[in-house]
Amino acid sequence: MKFLLPLAGCCFALAPLVSAQVSVELALDQDQFLPGESLEVGVRITNFSGQTLHLGKDNDWLRFTIEGRDNYIVPGSDDVPVQGEFDVESSTVVTRRVEVAAYFALTRPGRYLVTATVKLKQWDKELLSKPKAFDIIAGTKLWEQDFGVPNAAGQPPEVRKYALQQAIHLKQLKLYARVSDQSESRVFRVFPIGPMISFSKPECQIDKSSNLHVLYQTGAKSFNYSVINSDGRLLVRQTYEYTDTRPVLRVDREGRILIGGGARRGSSNDLPPPSEASSTNHAETSKP
């Protein structure tokens, strides 16, 4: 027994030794999210072990745990895609960014803690990060509309739902777009369109291709015009200004949706970028 004690002591001492040489930290781009909004976690691995770490060969090298109030463990999936081999050389730092919102049931507003466990197979050890806090906040629904997405020939269209929500993020009021199935049990995407002023009343129209056109006020004389497709991808983002007339959404004789009134103001924030923009109906302006 006298000979076994030092060996046991070495085994217990190895874990803190490894954690001192290799550390795992988590980072978030923001600390407030709407239910269904993308939640990308940055996993920062710092290596001062003197050896190169080989990670990502399989899908179990990295695991996430999300905990809510009263030690409630948020139900999640083991299928978070983290596979992809990479090396972390000694005296270097590598960050891997992983989208986790789609794999955890983050539907209830409240405070949450996310933790990551990194498995070092070459040493048969696991490292645990410190928890990173974030909040799920409840937005206010301003507008919603069911719409159809064409299916294969002979099949009825799939019914989805557009919704606009507003929420305060970092003391700033923002407008969010949400695309879900008709029952709202499956969310395809939630994302912020941009900041808005409190008295803005967004105008919404759905075109023949099932794209959502949104025009809303962002300042005393400025307006944001955005076009979103049925998968929740932002296709167009433009800025208009109130001149002698106010910008409004209009439908022409061919059923195209365009901006009537106001004046277009080019911006580096435009989508497509100014150099790529073509003369489509999205960029047209007509007199009211």
Image (cartoon, rainbow, N blue to C red):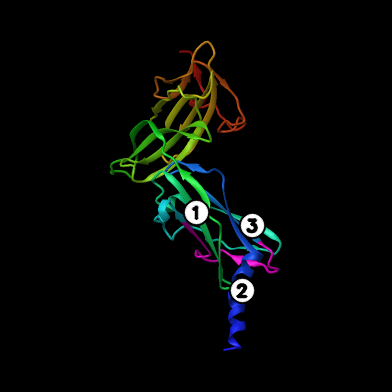
Q: Identify the residue position indicated by label 1 in the image.
A: 114
- Disc 1 versus disc 3: distance between alpha carbons? 19 Å
Task: Tell me the magenta residue range.
Answer: 47-65
- Residue 263 placement: quadrant: top right
55 in the magenta segment: yes
Q: Amino acid at mark 3?
A: Val
Residue 77 circle label: none
24 in the magenta segment: no
Q: Position of residue 207 (x, y in %)?
A: 39, 29
- Crowd tier of the residue under label 3, counting other residues whose Cα lies within 10 Å: few below 14, some 14–19, many 20 or above: some
Q: Amino acid at mark 2?
A: Ala
Q: Is residue 73 left or right of residue 156?
A: right
Disc with the residue nearer the chain's start (1 vs 3): 3
- Disc 3 versus disc 2: distance between alpha carbons? 26 Å
Q: Identify the residue position indicated by label 3 in the image.
A: 94
Disc with the residue nearer the chain's start (3 vs 2): 2
Say which of 77 and 13 sits in front: 13
- Disc 2 versus disc 1: distance between alpha carbons? 27 Å
Q: Identify the residue position indicated by label 2 in the image.
A: 13
Q: Nearer the viewer, mark 2 or mark 1?
A: 2
